[in-house]
Image (cartoon, helix red, strand yellow):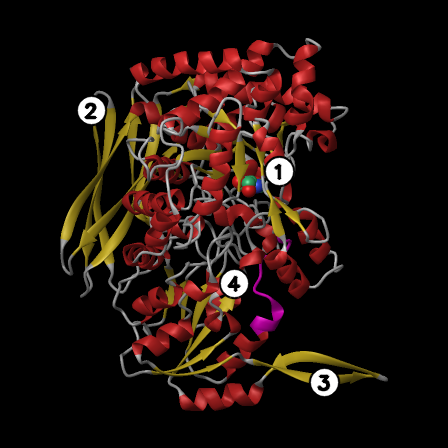
Amino acid sequence: MQTDQKINYEGRIQKLLNEMTLEEKAGQLRQCGPSLAGAFGVSFEELVNMMFDGKISKEEFDQQMSSAKQDFREEELRKGLIGSYNGIANAATANRLQKIAIEETRLGIPLLFGCDVIHGLRTVTPIPLAESCAWDVQLWEKTARDAAKEATAAGIHMTFSPMVDVAKDARWGRVSESAGEDVLLNSCYGAAKVRGYQSSDLTAQDSMAACVKHFAAYGAAEAGRDYNRVDMSMQRLFEEYLPPYEACVKAGARAVMPAFNDINGVPCSVNSWLLREILREKWGFDGMTISDSNAIAECISHGVVKDQADAAKRAILAGMDMDMASDSYHQYLADLVRSGEVSEERLNEAAANVLRLKFELGLFDHPYQTSPERERAQLLKPEYRRTAREAAVKSMVLLKNDQILPLPEDVKIGVVGALADDRAEMLGTWAFEGKGEDCVSIVDACRAKGVSFTYINGRKAVTKENGSNQASVTVVDDEAVSRLAESCSVILAAVGEKKEESGEAASRASITIPDEQMEVLKALVQTGKPVVVVLFNGRPLAIPWIAEHAAAVLEAWHPGVEAGSAVLDILFGEANPSGKLTVTFPYTTGQCPMYYAHIPTGRPGGKSKFTSKYLDTPLEPVYPFGYGLSYTSYEYSDIRTVLSEKEVSVCVKVKNTGNRDGEEIVQCYIRDQDAERARPVRQLAGFEKVFLKAGEEKAVSFVIPYEKLGYYNSRMVYAVEAGWFEAAVGRNCMDCLTCRFEYIGE
Ligand code: NOJ
């Protein structure tokens, strides 16, 4: 943002504030979602709960959703009591409401439309966890740019993305929305998304504001249970959790969403230390803060306020500008100012933050930034689909390959599993505008490519008698399985999680593949035919059996609209897999949270009794952070460090020793070996994706400023200490060349 622009806006903002009533100012701080009228007269969330509580079936839910009318509270809008809407992705509706705001309210202040555009709007791209496995900054930016073009065409001004909650616990369902367990990766991913959404000109018709979330440390929810408490040392918070949010702020993100959780007992929504001292004073953030949905009112359940008025007061004083969905500000703020409990200056400051964002987006000058024609022309353009396919291919991680892939063109495949033929399940979490009909399933892709294949679901319904009761259950369809095995040379089994099994409110206490899918898989392996497993899921899964028995395993995640095409691109070798895991795959849920950058104990796990390990499970993961195979092979050699005045360069040679061209994600890790506070056994310090032709060798070097070698010491001072460090470069966090260097200090 240019300062001279800001000065202009400040004058116009002040002029508006002078004219606004307290209610109108509070109105600017109010974000509403359309509520449902007709659907039994309840809100969307209540309707979802009715389905989960078994009061209505999924069919009734869908029917209510499609027939319910959305209520936009237009009378309140006309009075200037609504400043923003959430969840409207429709140009005609957005323009109709905007027209009311511009032409029928006293001051004609434009509305701000926010929406969750997390991994594409209509052109759904891989879930963030998947896309992070591409380790590709340009790709991250490009998919965000496409998302912004689609979303702005649908009337959206701000997306509640990127989510950069470092996620080390596979039980937490929202791992799927993050860039995984590493702090550097989340930082690079988040900053790229901000650049992609906002571009260099926020006023451009196809730019939208990025709202970074969930500030802070939501990914550390205790026991991986969603919305749960976060309790951690300040050192850990500053070293492992805060940097990605800061990177997004530094990249220019114009909005920040505080998290649902508390940190050390204080909910983020009312945490003035976070929202003022860290965000604004330390990092210099000058944008808008917006609560998570209903989070201000939920401070009552947290037990930190006595009622909703108190919640409104604590939140506004803490620095929360906009209230999403709870209506606490709408109901209580004006009175709180009149009674002197909240100063009008603070209300003005919050309203100014909202108005400034509207100015920065160009909404005062061009309130109608789209039209139904533009929307029609933009959604699902062929070029977006091409990028979605590229992103899906680059996101997939080849976990195992017993020399069976790539498949020959004339192979006969037996395709098994409901997920191989379910388009909508390919969308993943947060794809409200995504449509199953836009997606390519594995079965679709096989047909389109002319592959010789047979498809079976693998299960059949039978009636079982239990005493006098008869019940219909599904069991493995053994006959169909053996017929299929006879007719093909390779079995392709699609297994994993449905899209609702990860994402918000989707924590799992057991991160395994559901039993009924495992039964089918075991029957398939029993046939003796090689089984290629394709995993569709939104979190790391505990899959030791699959890792041992499958002939090949491809981690496809929830890949979006081009799912099936991308899977086939890899299976048939049109693309050489290059993705690498950004999360650790444990053996069993009991190891969670399991992550590579752990702090060493005094008794590292080993064979002898009194070491840090489990009696009943290996200490190592099934697949480590940074792991992923290719159809070619790479050799690393000649690691060395070069020390100069301000930085250390870690240099290595990487050679493509196979017979296919490929891209290798080269990773550089650092360990401080004699620090005052124990440091992680390995910490990612840099990564580079290198294209190597077959037989080609390249020198790769990572320049690490000494400044980056520091950490927060026990007095919470960021210190760069002289001493010995280990540099490690390799293909994953456990397979590296290493060397040591000494930093002698300033
Ligand atoms: C709740 C989620 O935590 C947040 O990520 C999302 O942006 C809001 N709801 C708005 O839908």
Rendered view: 599 above or below 433 = above
What residue is pinned by disc 4? 543
Amino acid type shown at disc 4: Ile
Q: Who comes first in sequence, dot 3 or dot 1?
A: 1
What residue is pinned by disc 1? 73
**Disc assigned to residue 644:** 2
x, y (%) of residue 254? 42, 28
Asked which secondary structure carries label 2, the reply is: loop
x, y (%) of residue 542? 54, 59
- Residue at x 40% of width, y 45% of height: 151
Alpha carbons under labels 1 and 2: distance apart: 63 Å
The magenta segment is 507-518
Q: Is mark 3 within 8 Å of ligand 1?
A: no
Q: Nearer the viewer, mark 1 or mark 4?
A: 1
Whether tag 4 and tag 3 are in contact, CB under 8 A, the answer is: no
Residue reaching furthest to the front: 104
Q: Who comes first in sequence, dot 4 or dot 3?
A: 3
Q: Residues within 10 Å of mark 2 (few under 14, many from 20)?
A: few
What residue is pinned by disc 3? 463
Q: Quadrant of the C terminus?
A: top left
Asked which secondary structure carries label 1, the reply is: loop
Q: Nearer the viewer, mark 4 or mark 3?
A: 3
Indicate the quadrant of ligand 1 in the picture.
top right
Whether tag 1 and tag 2 are in contact, CB under 8 A, the answer is: no
**Disc assigned to residue 579:** none
Amino acid type shown at disc 1: Arg
Give the main secondary structure of the magenta stretch.
loop
Q: Who comes first in sequence, dot 1 or dot 4?
A: 1
Amino acid type shown at disc 2: Ser
Alpha carbons under labels 3 and 1: distance apart: 51 Å
